[in-house]
Image (cartoon, coloured by chain):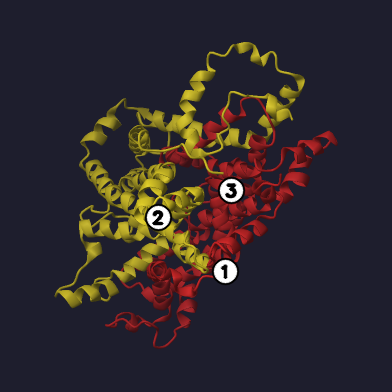
């Protein structure tokens, strides 16, 4: 009962995907509301406010200590030279100037971009295929779900070990298969482009997580839509493109954004495969590897902070761009329950 | 009046799922069973996909059981000619495996306990107490879901270094005590499905919020807490970058970086069968966890999470 009276104007953020899209307009429509609301707060409301804040206090502390403070401090550090010992010295925009002229930053950024351009779209397609397979009406579907998800449990470093053995130039199975077709050893991990392709392959086995999110979306598509389409004579392909894809678009958007964000941070596979060097020819030197090397290899914490801030800005910019472009394509109309 | 959601929060999700299964799987709309071949194309595709996705685990297990000579053979053998179970013992003794294992267990247990507790309490604050402005604050929780963590990496390292806690397990455990956006979101979605009347009745009876949290809400949301526990366990067990940054001494290292440094030290002469054996031992606890609790994995996302 307490519930109904409060905050009629708020849309409860029940769905992470729709709430992203409605957050901005909602906040602005709230602004003109007169202030005295706080003064008119009843005793019960004040009590609830106190209790609510008490219960979420762990999150508030976490927000301040583990997010707010580090973000602000990161920005401040990015204008300094700091080795982790002593006090940081102010260098103005020097770190940013260095970053834009550092050939290894350019190399790392282009490697990361190359990886993201292949891995992100591929992962979306694979995850969607898996989700559709997980959603089939067959008796043993639970078994397929288990099998498709299981590789997502294998940690990145172990999956990288498997591929190191699999792609080994002397006796790796991959190489032996290639040998059947042509002479000469193929050393995928010894080639600057090959190693990136290998890392794309490794990460695709983790598609299970995105697939589960797609599966949740698929199960929310009202079955009556398909029945209606069938009555109208639409085949399975037509149904997929006119019903499934449009209704999945918010989920696609979510997986796309998390996918891009993850791809910008690709690290572990490259670190394990190259033992942290990023070789051959800096072909596996991804942005996070170079950031890590500056921070923990060269103790250039100021410069590494500038790199982190740049990554943050690029990530934010990409996410906002995707949102903007997706506005026409994403369909929030059908809310199945 | 009893909607599926009510049933869910009363803990009879299983019954619901079974009913759904009976209705859907392998049956015609009239309820008669379909013949096994009715979905033959779909099955062929799914079996092919299954083989592809089983390949890494199969390859790992088979390589772990071969001799190094057999690993180098062409054509590769599908099954080990002699089953070298000794590889597992060799792998465990070739590195301080038990030490790594113990550290991984300590971190994982700590993270799971703290994550479940903190996210449960915070999610209760967002779902079950009705305070002015809570939905707006919740948008902030969702926003932090999209914050790329590298931007916090260096200041956090600096902070832990100043506290003198680098090279201890604390930097990897303590942050779990302060709730995280994804788990809070997941639990909140679940808690919102609990009938308000149940909670309000307890309030009328004079129960405090803390008591309601444990006596009324906790019993009906064990499945959701199980989901959070499992996701937190997998993330902590598999974490690589955190241990890489904070744990430099061998005595505090976890399995993930312990194995990596074992390989990089023996880069030239590393025994691949031992590496595969050790890797398999690392993922074995997760695979067992997954097979025992797999309902929680899949239902956690499909029902509690992203509706």
Q: Is residue A133 above or below residue A310?
A: below
Measure the C-alpha gap from mark 2 to mark 3. Answer: 20 Å
Q: Residue furthest left?
A: A183
Quadrant for the N terminus of chain B in the image: top right
Tell me if mark 1 has few (under 14), some (14-19) or many (20+) residues whose alpha carbon lies within 10 angstroms of its own: few
Q: Is residue A331 above or below residue A160?
A: above
User: Which chain comes out yellow in the rendered image?
Assistant: A
Q: Residue at x 69, y 24 (%)?
A: A5
Q: Is residue B214 left or right of residue A8?
A: right
Near mark 3 (Cα within 10 A), the count class, few <14, some 14-19 or many ≥20, is many
- Residue B307 in the image: x percent, y percent? 53, 45
Q: Secondary structure at mark 3?
A: helix
Which of the chains bears the disc numbered 1? Answer: B
Q: Residue at x 20, y 69 (%)?
A: A186
* Mark 2 crowd level (few <14, some 14–19, many ≥20, 10 Å Cα): many
Same chain, labels 1 and 3: yes
Report the residue marked by disc 1: B32
Indicate the chain coloured red by its letter. B
Q: Residue furthest bottom?
A: B82
The answer to whether one can see residue A148 in this image is: yes
Residue at mark 2: A127
Question: What residue is shown with label 3?
Answer: B304
Q: Which circle, 1 or 2, is nearer the viewer? A: 1
Query: In what element is the residue under mark 1?
Result: loop
The answer to which quarter of the image holds residue A314 is: top left
Q: CA distance from mark 1 to mark 2?
A: 32 Å
Q: Nearer the viewer, residue B23 or A248?
A: B23
Q: Position of residue A299 (x, y in %)?
A: 36, 42
């Amino acid at each position: 009962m307490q519930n109904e009276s409060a905050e009629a104007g708020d849309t409860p953020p029940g769905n992470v995907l729709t709430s992203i899209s409605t957050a901005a307009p909602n906040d602005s429509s709230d602004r003109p509301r007169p202030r005295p609301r706080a003064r008119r707060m009843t005793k019960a409301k004040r009590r609830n406010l106190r209790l609510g804040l008490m219960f979420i206090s762990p999150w508030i502390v976490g927000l301040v200590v583990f997010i707010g403070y580090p973000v602000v401090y990161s920005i401040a550090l990015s204008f300094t030279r700091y080795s982790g010992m002593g006090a940081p010295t102010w260098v103005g925009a020097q770190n940013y100037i260095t970053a834009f002229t550092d050939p290894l930053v350019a190399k790392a950024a282009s490697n990361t971009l190359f990886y993201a351009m292949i891995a992100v779209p591929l992962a979306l397609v694979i995850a969607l295929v898996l989700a559709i397979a997980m959603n089939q009406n067959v008796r043993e579907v639970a078994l397929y779900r288990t099998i498709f998800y299981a590789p997502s449990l294998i940690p990145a470093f172990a999956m990288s070990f498997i591929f190191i053995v699999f792609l080994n130039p002397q006796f790796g199975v991959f190489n032996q298969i290639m040998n059947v077709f042509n002479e000469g050893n193929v050393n995928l991990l010894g080639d600057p482009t090959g190693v990136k392709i290998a890392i794309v392959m490794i990460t695709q086995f983790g598609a299970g997580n995105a697939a589960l999110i797609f599966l949740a979306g698929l199960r929310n598509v009202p079955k009556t839509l398909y029945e209606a389409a069938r009555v109208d004579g639409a085949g399975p392909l037509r149904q997929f493109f006119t019903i499934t894809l449009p209704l999945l678009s918010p989920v696609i958007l979510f997986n796309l954004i998390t996918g891009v964000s993850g791809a910008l941070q690709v690290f572990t596979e490259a670190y394990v495969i190259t033992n942290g060097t990023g070789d051959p020819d800096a072909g596996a030197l991804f942005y996070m590897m170079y950031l890590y090397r500056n921070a923990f290899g060269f103790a250039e914490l100021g410069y590494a902070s500038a790199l982190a801030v740049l990554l943050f800005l690029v990530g934010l910019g990409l996410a906002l761009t995707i949102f903007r472009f997706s506005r026409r394509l994403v369909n929030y109309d059908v809310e199945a329950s | 009046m009893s909607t599926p959601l009510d049933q869910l929060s009363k803990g009879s999700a299983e019954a619901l799922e079974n009913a759904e299964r009976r209705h859907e799987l392998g049956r015609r709309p009239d309820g008669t069973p379909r013949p096994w071949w009715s979905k033959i194309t779909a099955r062929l595709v799914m079996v092919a996909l299954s083989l592809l996705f089983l390949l890494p685990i199969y390859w790992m297990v088979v390589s772990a059981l071969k001799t190094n000579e057999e690993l180098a053979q062409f054509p590769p053998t599908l099954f080990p000619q002699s089953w070298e179970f000794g590889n597992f013992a060799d792998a465990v003794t070739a590195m301080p495996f038990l030490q790594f294992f113990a550290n991984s267990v300590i971190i994982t247990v700590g993270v799971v306990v703290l994550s479940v507790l903190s996210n449960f309490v915070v999610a209760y604050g967002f779902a079950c107490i009705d305070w002015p402005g809570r939905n707006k604050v919740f948008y902030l929780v969702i926003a932090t879901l999209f914050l790329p963590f590298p931007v916090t990496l260096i200041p956090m390292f600096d902070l832990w270094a100043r506290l003198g806690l680098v090279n201890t397990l604390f930097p990897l455990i303590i942050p779990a005590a302060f709730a995280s956006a994804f788990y809070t979101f997941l639990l909140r979605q679940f808690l919102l499905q609990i009938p308000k009347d149940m909670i309000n009745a307890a309030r009328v009876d004079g129960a405090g919020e803390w008591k309601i949290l444990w006596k009324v809400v906790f019993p009906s949301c064990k499945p959701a807490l199980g989901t959070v526990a499992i996701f937190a366990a997998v993330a902590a067990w598999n974490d690589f970058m955190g241990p890489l940054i904070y744990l430099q001494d061998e005595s505090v290292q976890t399995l993930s970086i312990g194995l990596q440094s074992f390989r990089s030290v023996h880069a030239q002469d590393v025994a691949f069968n031992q590496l595969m054996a050790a890797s398999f031992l690392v993922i074995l606890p997760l695979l067992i966890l997954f097979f025992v609790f797999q309902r929680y994995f899949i239902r956690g996302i499909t029902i509690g999470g992203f509706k």
